[in-house]
Image (tube, rainbow, N blue to C red):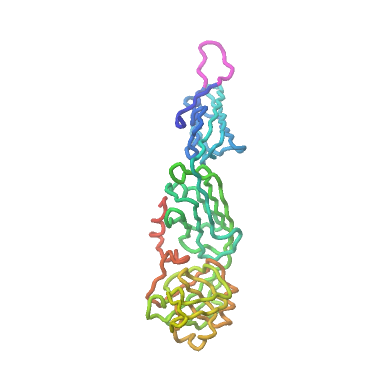
Amino acid sequence: MAGATAMVMVAGCGGGGGSSPAAKVSISPVNGAADSRPELPIVVKATSGKLGTVAVQGGGAQVAGAFDQAHQQWKSSRALKPATKYTVTATATDDGKTTTTTSSFQTLTPKLTFAISDITPMPDETIGVGMPLIVKFSKPVYNQADVERALRVTSDKPVEGAWHWFGRQQAVYRTKTYWQPHQAVHLSALLTGVRGAKDTYGTKDYSRSFKIGDSHISDVNVKTHRMKVQVDGKTVKTTPISAGKGGLRKYTTTNGVHAVMGKQSPVTMTSGWEGVTNKSDPNYYSLTVKDAVQISSSGEYVHSAPWSVGSQGHTNVSHGCVNAPPAFAKWFYALSRRGDIVNVSGTDRDLEPDNGFGYWQMSWTDWTKGSALH
């Protein structure tokens, strides 16, 4: 059985009768095990005396671990690689006599495996201060606490953050406050040997590094028809805008904290998203717009709108987008990167937390409730 204990002892040279017994060492998994569960740790104990050294080799690499304070136990620090042979060599000393114990075992071959199918941001991407980390898995994850424990985020300028699960196949990392600008962030997903679900194990580790650029925070006031842009805390540009005309929910610009999802120029926008596809319908439209910066997955952009310049600054006429003067829109397009913040105020339609990168719409308390580790 994989959970049994091996006790294989080789005593050092000793004298005649009456001498004290050699140190005793136990090793788990048991010597000769062929189906050890990789998520369970290797545990080495000195049942008498103290441990001296512990070395574990497997798959061409050494396994890391740590001793307890009394040096009577050593435990491996992460999951093992499935379908791999491991050899443990430990020494212990009792009353001046040293014992060397060796044990070998094999981890099981999993029936099923799971992997990471996508990580956002892209490698070495420079992102905005509100950008989330999004990890998508190839199969449903039921042991979410174990998987979440294997997802480790570090940054040059530490800030509190937490994972939140959206279903069984997507985990999103958000910081409590925005990232500090001008720093590097690294994600390590140590999934090798982690049990994601019944009979389902990870067999590969992943990593992703990216950069936080300048702080770009914009404020759009739908009631005053103005937009203000701040870079690293300083206002650099303001402009008149025209937002959603309202009347119907679908024509109302969503209220709250948006994070830029991407940008494209040109973009063809049609009334198809409203269910209007008949060209003879008076509500049908098809517009090609330039310098479009996306702020939600429900079709909202900050974009150039030369046809509504006369309304910008005093009337809301759009189908939900933020219409901007062409010169400003071109400048804002060049400035923008994923994760930049666009705060919209003055409407009665709140942005949903799962609409685009609307994760900032959740309070920190509610966000952490979605963590398997709380």
Residue 92 horizontal side relative to residue 346, left or right: right
Residue appearing at x 52%, y 27% in the figure: 32
Residue 57 horizontal side relative to residue 168, left or right: right
- Does residue 266 lie above or below 117 as drawn? below
Position of residue 302 measured from the top left corner of the image (x, y, whole percent): 51, 76
Q: Is residue 332 visible?
A: no
- Does residue 191 lie above or below 11 as drawn? below
**The N terminus is located in which quarter?**
top left
Q: How many marks?
A: 0
In depth, the one of 233 and 227 nearer the eye is 227
- The stretch of residues the image draws in magenta is 10-22
Position of residue 349 measured from the top left corner of the image (x, y, whole percent): 38, 73
Position of residue 80 measured from the top left corner of the image (x, y, whole percent): 53, 39
In depth, the one of 347 and 308 nearer the eye is 308
Does the magenta segment cover residue 201?
A: no
In depth, the one of 262 and 183 nearer the eye is 262
Residue sitting farthest toward the top: 17
Position of residue 220 measured from the top left corner of the image (x, y, whole percent): 47, 77
- Dividing the picture into quadrants, the one containing residue 11 is top right
Residue appearing at x 54%, y 57% in the figure: 119
Residue appearing at x 47%, y 26% in the figure: 47
Q: Is residue 178 visible?
A: yes
Does the magenta segment cover residue 14?
A: yes
- Of helix, strand and loop, which mostly describes the magenta segment? loop
